[in-house]
Image (spheres, coloured by chain):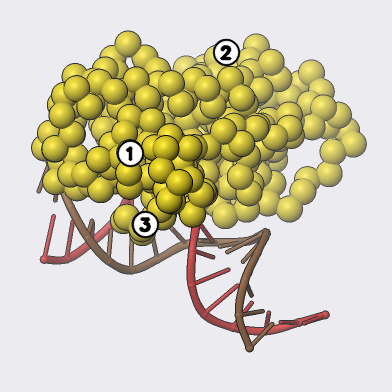
Chain colours: A yellow, B brown, C red
Amino acid sequence: MPELPEVETVCRGLAPCMEGHIIARLDQRRPDLRFPLPENLSARLQGRRVDNLARRGKYIIARLDDGQAMILHLGMSGRMMIHDDAGRFVPEKHDHVIFYMDHGPAVAFNDARRFGCLDLVAEKALDAHPFFARMGPEPLGNAFSGAVLHDALKSRNTPVKTALLDQHVVAGLGNIYVCEALFMAGISPRRKAANVSRAKCDALARAIRDVLMRAIAAGGSSLRDYRRADGELGYFQHNFAVYGREGESCGRCGDDACRIRRIVQSGRSTFYCPNTQR
DNA sequence: CTCCTGTCCTGCCGGC
DNA sequence: TGCCGGCAGGACAGGA
């Protein structure tokens, strides 16, 4: 569930607690998440200072003072919860890795479904890591545009909805924000990716940036499991135009009979307005 | 290459 | 009340 805005919100919430601070102790409570956790994880993290926290796509990257980088993915249900008083903190169900910071707080990586992952690599090797080697551009960065999007979609024979979920096309989008961006741009999720015109790609790139920025400003969207690092809920879910609104009017086409439709594409729910999305 | 399907996992919700 | 099936879905593996 955490998509780019949620991961960005978590990252920002975590930064004051981790950046510039030392991991005094690590509590690894199971051998694996989605993948086996790195060998000697505790020993390799203990005593390390976190120099920088950043986000790439849906991944959080913590650069450490010894040239290592820790990569975190929250998967479907992952949370990073800050507990201000580590002394009184008792690990909760599904707390798999706990970072005890030297200035007091504990940060718990909690992930009920364990679709998340954690890896530790040399910082120099980050760009070559399989997670990042072929990842598409950051939608909020300078390398993303309608032209770039058009280029990435032109060879794709799949529906544009499916293509946008592919992190090699553009980084950080998931089911919710893809639905929202396609609605904003007036593009049918069923349209073949290669048949989205250059002009529509411009509109789509703008819509993607717009919806992501608005969601970040709202602290992300809280559905089911997602929480910010401070435990608070984001509230962008109240601003969804189509996601989860099957049967409602889209409020844009002026047709009283308008009903937002839900279809399944590649096994995922898609919500859209058949009138205004072509 | 691209595309498609299966897989992982647990919590939640509706139906009976 | 409880059980059970279905669903949610990010991204990889593996086959076509």
Q: Could you tell whether A191 is left or right of A2 in the image?
A: left
Q: What residue is at 76 percent from the left and 21 percent from the top?
A: A102
Q: Which residue is mark 2?
A: A51
Instruction: Report whether residue A63 is seen.
Output: yes
Tag 1: residue type?
Thr
Do tag 3 and tag 1 residues touch (Cβ < 8 Å)? no
Q: Are marks 3 and 1 on the same chain?
A: yes
Question: Which percent across, then down, holds residue A136?
Answer: 29, 28
Q: Earlier in the sequence, mark 3 or mark 2?
A: 2
The C terminus of chain A, quarter of image: top left
Q: Earlier in the sequence, mark 2 or mark 1?
A: 2
Q: Could you tell whether A125 is left or right of A88 in the image?
A: left
Between the residue at mark 2 and the residue at mark 1, the CA separation in whole angstroms equals 47 Å
Q: Nearer the viewer, mark 2 or mark 1?
A: 1
* Element type at mark 2: strand
* Element type at mark 1: loop
Q: Which residue is mark 3?
A: A263
